[in-house]
Image (cartoon, rainbow, N blue to C red):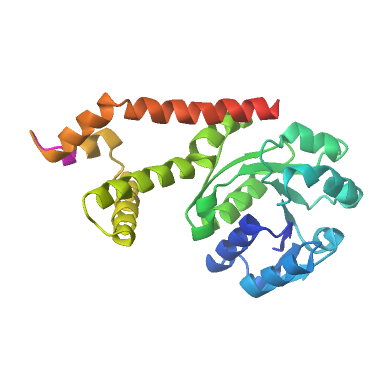
Amino acid sequence: MKIGFIGTGVMANAMMGGIISAGVCKPEDIIGADPTEFGRTKTKEQNGVEVTDNNLDILEKCDYVFLTVKPQYYAPVIEEIKDHVKENHVFISIGAGVTLDYLGKAFGDKNVKLVRVMPNTPAQVGEGMSAACPNEFVSEEETKTTLSILSAFGKAEIIPENLFDVVTGISGSGPAYVFLFIEALADAAVVGGMPRRQAYEFAAQTVYGAAKMVMETGKHPGELKDMVCSPAGTTIAAVRTLEANNFRSAVIEGANAATEKSAAMRG
């Protein structure tokens, strides 16, 4: 299997690195296309893959083709490649707000195999969360292969396209909320006298460990929270204060705002 990337930005390089590290493909089975020499050189140095300045090289050599350019460049890129699409090609789009309907029309309604994907930035450290939605022309086997590729840099699940705005609010934008929480938690440690560098380490590791407990124990987050809250203890005192300041409501409203903004931008 050959995998191509049209566009070699930060996310594309993170994906390539994950795919190689997971053993899904060897570096020589991945090709990245970029119009800039800087982009090609960086990708070659970072991941050791083949690079090119010609998008048509990707279609000639690859079965699975990631569209990893910015959304405003989709129209000219697809116009360039649409007459060279073959039956074996599966196009995986990560463009925010770029719908399957838009992609199908851009390709000229030629029954092109398309998978809309929304990854998130933790893909850069192999812990991404990707939503995927294939169109009707992608086979079950091709869908499984696509999920195996996406799982190389985190987790991936099939999600109906009408939930992609929700995915934006939860996982697409979600890392920013977590970073904000880590920063606030570290600020509290600094207030208490802890050095800044150490405060970030304690806060980040606490969030990482708590998330891992949710993923690995299968327990409800509320149950895990209750396990930490001893009667008349420090944790329940903190939880009471957070609830008094609408902690959960603020998170819900923030995520909903991102979801609504995503829908408005789409259209």
Q: Relative to residue 144, is residue 30 depicted above or below?
A: below
Left or right, 121 with respect to 65, comes to left
Q: Is residue 120 one of those drawn in magenta?
A: no
User: Outermost residue toward the right?
Assistant: 83
**Which residue appears at 33% of the width and 30% of the height?**
247
In the image shown, does 87 or 25 lie closer to the viewer? 25
On the question of residue 162 being in view, the answer is no
Q: Is residue 229 one of those drawn in magenta?
A: yes
Quadrant position of residue 34: bottom right
Task: Tell me the quarter of the image containing the C terminus.
Answer: top right
In the image shown, does 108 or 72 lie closer to the viewer? 72
On the question of residue 211 being in view, the answer is yes
Q: Which segment did they paint magenta? A: 227-231
Left or right, 86 with respect to 139, comes to right
Q: Relative to residue 256, is residue 10 depicted above or below?
A: below
**Which residue appears at 73% of the width and 65% of the height?**
39
Task: Tell me the quarter of the image containing the N terminus.
Answer: bottom right
Left or right, 142 with respect to 63, comes to left
- Residue 87's x, y, as percent? 82, 50
Left or right, 96 with respect to 220, comes to right
- Residue 43's x, y, as percent? 68, 68
- Residue 100's x, y, as percent? 73, 35
**Which residue appears at 32% of the width and 48% of the height?**
187
What type of secondary structure mainly makes up the magenta span?
A: loop
Quadrant position of residue 199: bottom left
User: Outermost residue toward the left?
Assistant: 232
